[in-house]
Amino acid sequence: MGETLEPHHIAAKAPELPGPFAVGRYARKLQEEMRRRARVLLIGEVTGVGRSKVQAYFELRDGEGAVPCAIWLDDLDKAGLPDGALRDGAEVVIAGGPDYYPGGGQASPSFSFRATHVRLAGEGDLLARLEALRKQLRAEGLFELQGQLRRPVLPKTIGVVTAEAGAARRDLLAGLRRRGWAGTVVWAFAPVQDRHAAPAITAAIQDLAARPQVEAIVVSRGGGSLADLWAFCDETLCRTVAMLRVPVISAVGHERDSTLIDDVAAVACSTPTHAAEAVVPLDCGVARLDLQRSIASLSRAAEGAVRARTPHLVALARGPARALRRERLALNQKTREIRAASERGLAERLDFQRRLATVVLERARRRAAGAEMERRRAALHRAEVALRAHEPERTLERGYALVEDREGEPVTDTAGAAAAERVRLRFADGSVGAKIEEGE
Amino acid sequence: MTEKPDSYEVAVERLEQIIDRLDSGQAGLRETLDLCREGRDLVTYCTAELDAVGEDLKELKLDELAEKLASSASPGSA
């Protein structure tokens, strides 16, 4: 093998423990240890009952576990149980403690809870178990879940878990009819007696909840002892109900009975009749009357709203004509004012223009008069020049002489000169007398 | 009808709001007429819901419900 060790060689060497002891001796020591343990009462359901010549054996179990039990037939007889009471399904309380049978050369060893007393579980025992379970489920918050679900006030389809032949079925239907409700009831019949019914009830509830048409589920059973109703305290059933998304209405037992399903359900009712009211919260007859009142209210409101506004609407309707008339009058007035103003303005403008024209004309006239004067002055000057050109003095200045008679009249021909005899010769620088001496 | 209500209780709740608003007298004419129209639609819806559970109470066993659903799901077998 060399230096390599197999794992089991290591395991065999590793623990540093006392021993090894002879197993038979150890088994007897174990028995002593067991028998020294405290004696207690246990409560649970009996299953797997069997008998040998000297003892009865069975398992005592509940939802969480089980213990193998044995009781000497002598002790069983002393317990005074009714015949056949120690049977599968019986809820019992046993007193005793753990024991160990070490076996022998041929006999197999075994462990059991050695019961020295046994009695059927009473109401008090069941209540104690119920309280313990209730406390646990409450602590887990399972009591609040169903209460948070929305419950339809007018479901069309409801599921019901109950016994097929029970009075609960009849009472529930009667309650639904009193609500004026005539939808669909889906029955999931199940046994409802004692704790053995729990799995069937749980399955029925689950089957109903799996149908999307089912809007709410009623679980109903008539009254009875707590043992009769024990199925409705079953932990699995109650956990199932708590986790459903469909609201569950429980109506199990009577008012004084308090089963665990009441704690986890959305609503707990004391009777099937109450359950009918809980699963269909709406009284359909009352609802129809309410709707009629609603229709009346709506009609009243609509008519009232229009009627209340009618005078205002009429006033509004008249409003435009009145406003139009008022505006027309105002417009006419404005028109007159504008016309008057424009006429006045026109006259003023005319007058102004006239005055303006006068001034302009005057100025023009003046300007024209000046030019004329100039023109005339020039003409006069020209005439004066022309005239002066024709004056005798001008001629005289050029060396000519003017012949005048005695009266000063010009003598322009020889005949006049001969006649005048004496004339004056007028030169530019003066005149001299002259005598006409010879004629022609 | 305006938008279909989710459920009867939703419709009734809205209807009560409408009537409260109308009763307050604070709604204007347009709002009043709109609310009345909406209210009448809700009443129609609620009446139909009541009629749906107002004829004959039907009783089915769970397996009968399953069969009914199966037959309605396949028209050829109806």
Image (tube, rainbow, N blue to C red):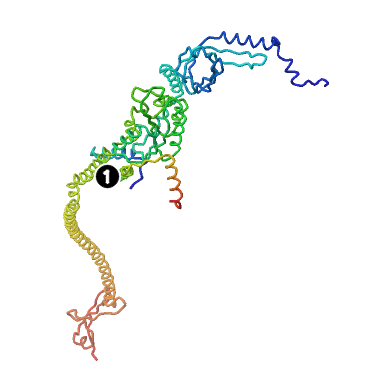
Q: In the figure, residue A152 lies in which quadrant?
A: top left
Q: Few, some or many C-alpha atoms within 10 Å of disc 1 (few <14, some 14-19, many ≥20)?
A: many
Image quarter where the N terminus of chain A lies is top right
Q: Is residue A150 above or below residue A389?
A: above
Q: Is residue A415 visible?
A: yes
Image quarter where the C terminus of chain A lies is bottom left
User: Residue at position x 62%, y 11% from top?
Assistant: A30
Residue bearing the label numbered 1: B36
Q: Chain of mark 1?
A: B
Residue A45 lies, in percent from the top left, at 49, 21
From the viewer's perspective, is A177 left or right of A411?
A: right
Residue A318 lies, in percent from the top left, at 17, 51
Residue B16 lies, in percent from the top left, at 28, 38
Q: Is residue B17 visible?
A: no
User: Residue at position x 56%, y 18% from top?
Assistant: A52
Nearest the camera: A412 or A376?
A: A376
